[in-house]
Each structure stands twice: as structure tokens, then as C-alpha cells.
Image (cartoon, coloured by chain):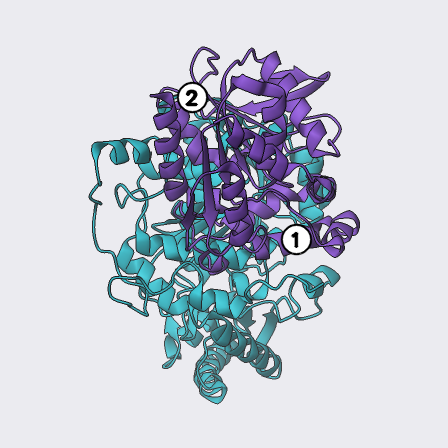
Chain colours: A purple, B cyan
Amino acid sequence: MYIQVDNANTFIATGGKPFDASLPTVVLLHGSGTDHRGWALQARWFAFHGYSVFAPDFPAHSLSDGEALTSIEAMGAWLIQALDTAKVNNVHLVGHSQGFLVALEASVLLGDRVKSVTALATASAIPVNPALVETAQTNPKAAAAMMLQWGFGTQHQYGASAVPGMQPIGIGARIMANNPLAIDLAACNDYTKGAQRAQHLASIGCPSCVILAGQDRMTPKREGLKLAQDLNTHAQVVEESGHMLLMEAPKQSLKIMKIFIQSVEK
Amino acid sequence: MSKSSFLGADTIALHSGYQPESDHGSRAVPIYQTTSYVFDSVDEASALFNVEQGGHIYSRITNPTVAVLEQRLAALEGGAGAICTASGMSALFVSFFSLCSAGDHIVSAAQIYGSTITLLKHTLKRFNIDCTFVDINDQQAVANAIQDNTKLVFCESIGNPGLAVSNLPAIAKTAHAQGVPLVVDATFATPYLNNPIKHGADVVVHSVTKWIGGHGVAVGGVVIDGGNFDWLKSGRFPTLTQPYEPFHGMNFWEEFGPAALAMRIRCESMRDIGAAMTPHNAFLLLQGLETLSLRMQQHVSNAQAMVTWLQQQDTVAWVNHPDIDAQAHTKTLFPKGAGSMLTFGVKGGRDAGAAFINALQLSSNLANVGDSRTLVLHPGSTTHSRLSEADLVAAGISADLIRVSVGIETIKDIQSDFGLGLRAAAKVVAMQAEA
């Protein structure tokens, strides 16, 4: 569905069913330079099993218009606007990589509207090599290629696909081709409040779930484990996956996500 | 900072899409000779049917062995996804079927495979899909032929059998300027010689039967979704950008983006038409694909040697290969050589040509190309025999044209064999002179 946020046409993927704000809402937040399509399979499962799905393309990403947001704080505030526009009240926030930093930031603004947080392949802080940011500014295609090579684990570098016949790296390259990767990477690099936000969520007893990838070279597992500590939860690791966990291991990641979110809903 | 370094093409051809499976460690890709797949639970079955998870349901739709070939070919061509089909013609059919509906229109190169002309001119016409044939390298003609209801521009990267090389970047530019995708049959080029997606193509089709298999034992096709075309911005493709009722209103573009067309073909064409590749054929074709680059080097080398040799024979009237007086775009698109197909005519016309073919011992007279063995054919009597005289001229087929798919045999043996044929042709010429 399309909604207007900040006077910009904004695309919200709903998992193949009409959005219904009266249902428990799962908010799926994409990572740097990507879009809602990384969540294609997980979104469909939630949408067809009693939830509403709210998976936005952030401004200037893929199907959404507007100016790219330059800080995680701005992205968090934008998400609240988007949720309010769609009249969404309580949410399960799920974020991949940068998307979870946004979830952490948004959680402060949402307060008790947050029912749970789920982190996939991420950390409390995501410092980015300055050379990668510079490459993303000067040669976005080259930077996207680097990220895809580091982002996907061994099996996917060898052409594996959870969906028969598809090429996740090829799909990722197309999605990232026109998105503001450099701005996203800089925003990740500059964000320093992640640990503090995570510890706050733990202190108020917000249910949390951390799913990490054993072959993650973008946000290494050890950093994800620190995030789990900050959130006062145990991390679950999908060993054979790289950073693009939601595309590389959709079945395994969905299984953990749904068990967790269903447990919160009970 | 290091540059990205994805696998090279030769490695992809050997490894992509499969790593030794955990149960038995089979190094070769196993043949999953099964119609169907046991579900863990009713919930899992439901999730598979509703595209909530990837996996296999029924081998008409997907199969693990076929999927390896699909993923390998998608990687080799630099695409977002691929769907293998029962033949090259079925790959073309599902591509057209997925992009066009009744009342739509296609712009096609005139110099293409005879059966494809028949499909475009007669078969699709029955479903009210029209086609305008043009000189594909005349961009004004292509632009003029595109109508409001045009859904694709189609060409072969190297035309069969005229061997005209399509100027893919120019054609793509013309098509894209009017919001129309470019579909390219790249069978004669193979992924080794040219990757059309890198030159602007949006969809690539192969008859995998040919050089990719190379052994001439299995028929198959593939559609590769380039993933670069913006189906929504084009405004011409409701089949991809509007809800699809059979899948609860699935919007392929919104949900799958760069893989929208591949997913539509999977969900609709493979289900409704069922032109599936068999797992055994996929296995056989994978064996061929593994050595594609090595074979293509020999194919091209032999073809170039045969061109030179034929040009030196007194009994040969003319020789055609894209590398002869190559146009600038041919050199750009085919730096490793423009394939291993050549055509020629012997002095004495059709009768002398027939004598040539009938005298051959090593080379095979048959309706296929891209076999590792040298193959010859008289298209005017066979593959293009259903075309009118006007269509034959448009397709670049003269009465004396002999099509040669140069194999990878020892070159002197191919030349000796053709020598037999040329002597037989010369006798016909002598008899014609006496008469």
C-alpha cells in the first residue's frame, strides 16, 4: 500500500494482504541500501497467519519517494510518523542490520506501544569502514558489489537460493543499484546510542529476540552477542548464513521470529 | 579496500547452485527423479503453496536438480533468476505468454529461427497477439513499430540462420525509450561469448539443447530474468504490477521486484502450461555446461578456420560469418568471436548444395545446432521450409544457403569431409554446364 509521509509517497509492503491496523502488527525494517523485498517470504507468512505486516521502504528507497534520511534518529522519528499515518498502535518491531538500529531508536519514541523487538544480523553499533562509505559515494555500484560479497555467506556466493531458480545476490544488486547506500552507511556509522537503547528496553522488560548469522562479516556474530547481552536475552545463531540472513535463511529466521512473536502474543 | 571478487564464469559453470549435499556428500549434482516432495506438516505445505517459504512441491513447478541448472545459468548470465523449461521454444512461449495478453503486440527481428517466426506470426495470432517484423538494427524502424500495446521487442543476439548480429545496446535504448523491455534469444552466443543483460537486455532465453548441453542428448530451454526492467514505471504490464487473483492478489512487482517476471512464470506458466524440464535432462545439461567455455573456445577456433578454408575453395560461391567484415557492434559484443555458426553457398545453387550435404561422411545432416559434432542443414528445405518466399528473403535465407554448426573435431578432419562435399558439388556444376 502507499501512504503519504512527510508529503512523500511511501510504499508499505503488507505481505500480500490488505493492511488491517486492528490486527497485531509486525513491522519489518530493512537494512542499508535495501528494501522491503528482503522480507518477502517472512512478510507473507505473518500476513496470512493473523498479523498485519508493515514493511516500509524508507524514503528514497525503491518504491518510496522523498529525501533519504541522514541519521538513525531521523529514521526512527519517520517510522513513528508512518505508523501514525496508518493508525498503527502496538507493534512488534523487527529489524535487519540498520533496520534494528532504527527499531531501537523508534522504541524510545513508541514507549509502551512496543510489544517486542527482534534483531536479525545486527549489533548495537555498526561502524562502517570509511573507505566503504567513500566508495558508496563515488561508485555506488562497486560499493553494493562489495557489500553483496561480504554480506552473503559461503553457500550463496556459490549460487545457493532458498527459492528455487533465483539468484539472491543478483536480486540484491538490482535492489541496491538505485538506493542511497552511502547515506545509509554514514547514518549507521554515526549512530552511537544503540547499546543505551537496548539496555533501556531490557530494563523495562521489553521482550526481545536476537537472531545472528554464523558467517556474518558485516556485523560479526561477536557484536551481535553483545547486543543480546544489552537486551538481556539469548542470541540464536543460524551458523550457515551470512549477513543477509533474511534472504539466505528465510525458513530458519522465520521459524525463530514466529515462535518468539507468537509467544509474546499469548 | 579490496574490490569485490565474485566467482568467475568458469567456476560458476562448475559449482554454482550446488555444494555437496550433507546426506551422502555427492560431488556431482544428484538427479532428483521424483514427481513430488514430502511436506513436514500441513502448515509447511500451506506455506509452500502460498509462497511463504521456498522449496519444492511438484516437479512440474520446481525440482532440485533443475533448480541447480537454473541458478547456474542465472549466475552465468548475470540475472536475478531463471526458469528452465522443456525446450527453447517453450522458454520463448512462456516469456511471451507472461508478458502479453490478447490484444497486445510484439516487435520482432525479421531474421530469426523459423519456428519462432511461426510462433509469432501464426500461433500467437490465434490469441490476438500481433507481431511486426523489422530490420532489428534499423532503430528508426524499431521505434516506429512500437505501439501503445507493444509489450516487448524481440531479437536473437545472432540471427538464425542469417547470422546478423543484433546491436543490443542500440535496440535496448530504443525499446527502453518507449517503456518496452528487450527479450533476447542468445542461443547462438551462449553465456561464454556474450551476456545480453550487460548490454541492455531485460530477458534472456536460451535453447539449452544447443552449445550449453553440447552433447545433443537432451532438449531444454531457459528464461533468465535480467531483473533490471522497471515494470511499474513502464505502465504496460498489469500482469506484473497488479494483483494476481489465483495467488490471493499477489503483486509480483511489489513482492519480488527484480525477480517479478521469473516468479510470474514460475507461478503461472509452469503451473498452467507445465512445460517443465525433466530432472534427468537437467542433469545431462549440467554435464555439458561444466565444460562450456572449453568447448566454445574450440568451436570458435574451428569456425574461424573453416571460414578461412571455405573462402579459399573455388567451388564456394560465398561464405557468411559475423566476424567477416565485422561491424563495430559485433566486435564490441563478441570480443571472443561471434560464434561457431557459418553459412555458405556452393556454386551451382540448391542442387549442388544438396550434393554437398549428401556426400558428407563426418558431418551430420540434421535439424540441430550447437552439438559438439559438426552439423549441416539446408534451412530452405527444413527448418524454414514453412516460410513464404518473401519471409525467406526477409530471414536472409537464399536457396543455396547451407547452414553449418562447426563442431570441435580435429579441424583437418572437418575440412577433409567438406572437401568430399565440395567435390560432389563440383560434379553437379559440371553436369549443369554440360546440360
Specify whether A44 is left or right of A141.
left
Q: Position of residue A102 (x, y in %)?
A: 62, 32
Query: Which corner quadrant of the image does residue B7 belong to?
Result: bottom right
- The residue sitting at 39% across, 57% down in the picture is B69
Looking at the image, tell me whether mark 2 or mark 1 is earlier in sequence order: 1
> From the viewer's perspective, is residue B323 above or below residue B208?
below
Residue in the foreground of this view, choosing between B104 and B49: B49
Give residue B367's position: percent from left, percent from top.
38, 62
Q: Which percent across, then down, holds residue B225?
A: 51, 45
Q: Amino acid at mark 2?
A: Gly
**Which residue is under mark 2?**
B249
Q: Chain of mark 2?
A: B
* B378 left or right of B38 in image: right
Q: Residue at x 28, y 62 (%)?
A: B30
> Could you say where residue B236 lies in the image, as x and y percent from the top left?
59, 27
Residue B199: give its label.
1
Task: Look at discs 2 and 1 and give the one toward the viewer.
Answer: 2
Q: Residues within 10 Å of mark 2 (few under 14, many from 20)?
A: few
Callout 1: SS: helix
